[in-house]
Image: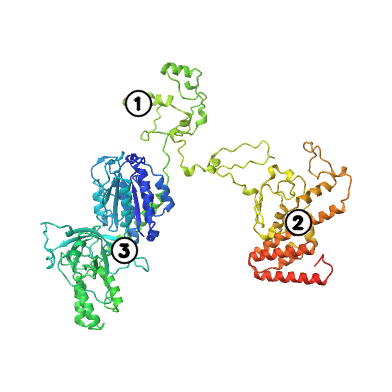
């Protein structure tokens, strides 16, 4: 999982504009986003972790660390501002410490026990800066210096602040402010000559001098290709140069060191394609012989110094003995080896002071060109493999895993020359071979008890420091102290409250003040005056003699400026320049504004409906007044259970429109349902309940939610508007209870039922009333049956109980049942469909045998 850390220069010089019209900081932000898009094309980018550090002090400079999400990274990137100094040394140290924070906890560095290339956490630091002078609070620096002191535990175990799997690349922006007339040079991007370039080369990276947007895109594509899993190693030649080959053409070699004699390059550590994690067997030896009596460990260099001998040797590989193979990054050394065209010979590699009695040490592997001569590989073998491999070969082929006494003596002599930390790797290799009992279990690994205790203590301290820093990242800066506004009550009238203050001040200074005349000092108790100049500290002098003589003129001019240029905005603790500087993401945050607003006054007319604010969303609906029923329809407005839908004359503007229902059950055979508004007359809702009671329907046999659903259905049941209008005309010819006479006000024109003469409805009216009641009952049953169909399971007893209560003629019941079958087919209820079809066939048979068609 590669770690990509972006170090963005946020010094004030990043505000300079280019000929493109954008600042350097804008270009840096765009470069980060472009890099992420280019990297996203690679499927291996799913495991990437992005971090963001700027030039502020710790912990404010860490904008996105180990725990922050990708959204936090992008938000912090967009909010960067260039206001500080070019403290790149301190910021680089912060970046390295952030990367190394968890290494002691995981034990990835394996101090004192060899360097394992397959234990790595590859990280790339991409610094984007303008390459100007290095400025800090102590002055201007010519060279880049990283602080020596750091709170990171265990930093003394490594000489450098970085590790061998961390590389630094720098994009130095040199885009001019005016467009250049000369054409851009073709070819690669040259390195920059700024102070950060040597640091890049030491870590195994490089710098880019960017003069145009095209070069910047070219650099970003190059950086994406640099994301490789590997470690950096210093290769140095030891001994004489190899003799020239016989068939090679004679070349004139300049005297002195050649470029291939010393290379500082990467070796690729490929992950296992099955597990995605690198797998290895043998470490690279340490540059010292471990002493069990030593209380401390000597510090190691970040990159191991591996020496290679140019004497040709035979490559040794034995079956069942594991080895590690790493490809070298292209360099002058790999080019020289490939030009020799000798894939069947190798050069042995050493680490100085790794052996007990030898300065150069014993070979632990070799460099060899591939058979196809397209790359050079580093083979890592057991320590002093020219002695061990023949012994293991004899053990397998000659002794058949039954070692003799002479073989054991030779093997024990080899173990005395091998560093003790190789015992674990050798035991695993022997177990793979099939000889697990050659090494005793009580052999020491080479670290003293004090060193082991010290490493455990460092691991615990690193964990505490990791948790502490993670908790500090993302915390807001505490508000800066300002000048508190005090009210000195009980005194005389202030000079600013005199009526002739304006004329008096104008006669003295010749200009009118910007201070408002009606100024109440009690109104601003607890407010603070913001300081535009952050370096100035609040000064509250009460005695003019407390002001130093050297500061007297400055204080006088400051007092005059505060008196004449004070505005209401600054008295409220707000900066006039930043009053309207609100991020776009916060402009629509109206809810927080409402929470901070004072409590509104009581409504003058509480009976009127409250106006719903639609700030940010003109289609916003009040969910408290919304009701969803099983027919996928919703109705807005207050839901009064004792009301019935009125006709369209009672509705202002025609009311809201219905949503179109997609269910065939709720669409077929259903009359138009007018929208619901609070009507003026009560609704006889008890007819439905009484009708259900007559059919012996008990709520105890249904779930608890069904009576509530029935009550909900009462509020928006369908009625034919024509029938409703005829009923209003034929019933008594009088308004209903609770309605007002035309032209009456309040309740003065209300007619009591005792004053009305009793009249009986006509047969036509009674017939229509019965039809409407049966229609309402059927609609109620239809909603309840639909709800039961949507429930999981095969409990259909309630459905057939409701079907037996259908009102109306035989045709009405058959149409109703066919719609129920369609609704069951919509939810793929096959068993229910078969039962309903049988029920339908039973109705047909009964109708054929009986002449009475009104009941089942």
443 and 648: which is toward the camera: 648
* Residue wearing tag 2: 776
**Mark 1 residue element:** helix
Q: Nearer the viewer, mark 3 or mark 1?
A: 3
* Residue wearing tag 3: 119
Residue pictured at 34% horizontal, 67% vertical: 272
Which quarter shows the C terminus? bottom right
Give residue 382's mark.
none
Report the Cα–Cα distance between label 2 and label 3. 76 Å
- Vertical order, 35 against 838 (above or below): above
Q: Nearer the viewer, mark 2 or mark 3?
A: 2
In terms of sequence position, does the residue under pointer 2 or pointer 3 come before the other? 3
In terms of sequence position, does the residue under pointer 2 or pointer 1 come before the other? 1
67 and 805: which is toward the camera: 805
- At label 2, counting other C-alpha atoms closer than 10 Å, the crowd grade (few under 14, some 14-19, many 20 or more) is many
Residue 384 visible within the image = yes
Residue pictured at 49% horizontal, 34% vertical: 526
Residue 309: horizontal and vertical position, in percent? 16, 65
Answer with left or right where residue 555 lies relative to residue 147: right
Report the Cα–Cα distance between label 2 and label 1. 88 Å
**Mark 3 residue element:** loop
848 and 326: which is toward the camera: 848
In terms of sequence position, does the residue under pointer 3 or pointer 1 come before the other? 3
């Amino acid at each position: 999982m590669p770690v990509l850390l972006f170090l963005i220069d946020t010094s004030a010089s990043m505000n300079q504009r280019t000929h493109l019209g954008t600042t350097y900081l804008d270009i840096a932000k765009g470069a980060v986003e472009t890099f992420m898009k280019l990297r996203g094309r690679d499927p291996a980018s799913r495991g990437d972790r992005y971090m963001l550090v700027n030039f502020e002090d710790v912990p404010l400079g860490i904008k996105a660390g180990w725990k922050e999400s990708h959204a936090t990274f992008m938000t912090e990137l967009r909010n960067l501002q260039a206001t500080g100094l070019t403290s790149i040394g301190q910021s680089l140290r912060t970046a390295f410490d952030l990367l190394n924070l968890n290494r002691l906890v995981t034990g990835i560095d394996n101090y004192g026990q060899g360097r394992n290339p397959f234990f790595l956490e590859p990280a790339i630091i991409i610094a984007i800066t303008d390459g100007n002078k290095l400025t800090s609070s102590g002055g201007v620096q010519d060279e880049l210096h990283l602080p020596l002191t750091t709170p990171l535990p265990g930093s003394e175990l490594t000489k450098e602040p970085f590790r061998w799997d961390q590389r630094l690349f720098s994009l130095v922006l040199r885009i001019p402010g005016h467009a250049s007339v000369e054409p851009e040079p073709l070819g690669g991007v040259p390195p920059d000559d700024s102070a950060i370039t040597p640091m890049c080369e030491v870590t195994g990276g490089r710098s880019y001098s960017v003069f145009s947007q095209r070069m910047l895109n070219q650099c970003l594509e190059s950086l994406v290709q640099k994301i490789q899993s590997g470690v950096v190693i210093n290769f140095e030649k030891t001994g004489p140069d190899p003799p020239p080959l016989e068939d090679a053409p004679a070349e004139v070699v300049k005297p002195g060191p050649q470029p291939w004699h010393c290379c500082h390059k990467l070796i690729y550590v490929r992950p296992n394609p099955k597990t995605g994690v690198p797998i290895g067997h043998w470490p690279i030896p340490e540059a010292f012989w471990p002493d069990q009596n030593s209380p401390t460990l000597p510090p190691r260099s970040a990159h191991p110094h591996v020496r290679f001998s140019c004497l040709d040797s035979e490559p040794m590989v034995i079956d069942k003995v594991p080895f590690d193979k790493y490809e070298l990054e292209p360099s002058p050394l790999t080019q020289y080896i490939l030009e020799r065209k000798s894939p069947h010979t190798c050069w042995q590699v050493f680490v100085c002071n790794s052996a007990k009695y030898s300065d150069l040490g014993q070979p632990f592997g070799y460099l060899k060109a591939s058979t196809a001569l397209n790359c050079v590989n580093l083979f890592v073998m057991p320590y002093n493999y020219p002695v061990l491999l023949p012994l293991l070969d004899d053990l397998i082929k000659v002794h058949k895993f039954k070692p003799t006494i002479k073989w054991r003596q030779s093997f024990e002599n080899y173990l005395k020359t091998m560093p003790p930390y190789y015992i674990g790797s050798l035991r695993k290799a022997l177990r793979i071979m099939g000889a697990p009992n050659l090494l005793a279990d009580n052999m020491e690994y080479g670290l003293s008890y004090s060193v082991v205790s010290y490493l455990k203590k460092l691991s615990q301290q690193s964990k505490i420091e990791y948790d502490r820093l993670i908790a500090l990242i993302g915390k807001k800066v505490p508000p800066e102290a300002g000048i508190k506004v005090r009210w000195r009550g009980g005194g005389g009238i202030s000079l600013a409250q005199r009526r002739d203050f304006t004329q008096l001040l104008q006669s003295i200074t010749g200009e009118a003040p910007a201070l408002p005349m009606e100024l109440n000092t009690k109104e601003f108790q607890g407010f603070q005056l913001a300081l535009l100049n952050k370096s100035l500290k609040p000064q509250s002098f009460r005695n003019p003699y407390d002001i130093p003589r050297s500061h007297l003129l400055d204080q006088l001019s400051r007092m005059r400026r505060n008196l004449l240029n004070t505005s209401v905005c600054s008295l409220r603790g707000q900066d006039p320049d930043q009053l309207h500087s609100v991020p776009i993401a916060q402009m629509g945050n109206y809810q927080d504004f409402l929470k901070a607003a004072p409590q509104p006054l009581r409504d003058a007319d509480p009976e009127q409906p409250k106006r719903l604010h639609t700030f940010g969303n003109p289609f916003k609906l009040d969910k408290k007044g919304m009701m969803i029923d099983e027919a996928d329809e919703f109705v807005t407005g207050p839901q009064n259970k004792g009301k019935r839908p009125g006709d369209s004359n009672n509705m202002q503007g025609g009311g809201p429109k219905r949503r179109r229902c997609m269910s065939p059950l709720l669409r077929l055979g259903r009359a138009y349902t007018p929208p619901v508004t609070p009507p003026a007359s009560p609704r006889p809702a008890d007819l439905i309940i009484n009708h259900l009671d007559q059919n012996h329907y008990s709520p105890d046999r249904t779930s608890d939610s069904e009576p509530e659903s029935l009550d909900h259905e009462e509020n928006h049941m369908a009625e034919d508007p024509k029938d409703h209008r005829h009923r209003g005309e034929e019933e008594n010819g009088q308004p209903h209870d609770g309605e007002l006479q035309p032209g009456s006000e309040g309740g003065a024109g209300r007619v009591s039922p005792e004053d009305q003469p009793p009249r009986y409805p006509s047969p036509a009216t009674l017939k229509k009333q019965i039809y409407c009641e049966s229609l309402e009952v059927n609609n109620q049953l239809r909603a309840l049956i639909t709800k039961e169909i949507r429930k999981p399971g095969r409990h259909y007893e309630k459905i057939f109980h409701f079907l037996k209560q259908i009102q109306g003629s035989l045709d009405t019941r058959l149409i109703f049942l066919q719609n129920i079958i369609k609704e069951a087919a919509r939810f793929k209820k096959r068993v229910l469909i078969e039962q309903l079809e049988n029920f339908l066939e039973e109705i047909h048979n009964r109708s054929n045998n009986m002449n009475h068609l009104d009941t089942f």
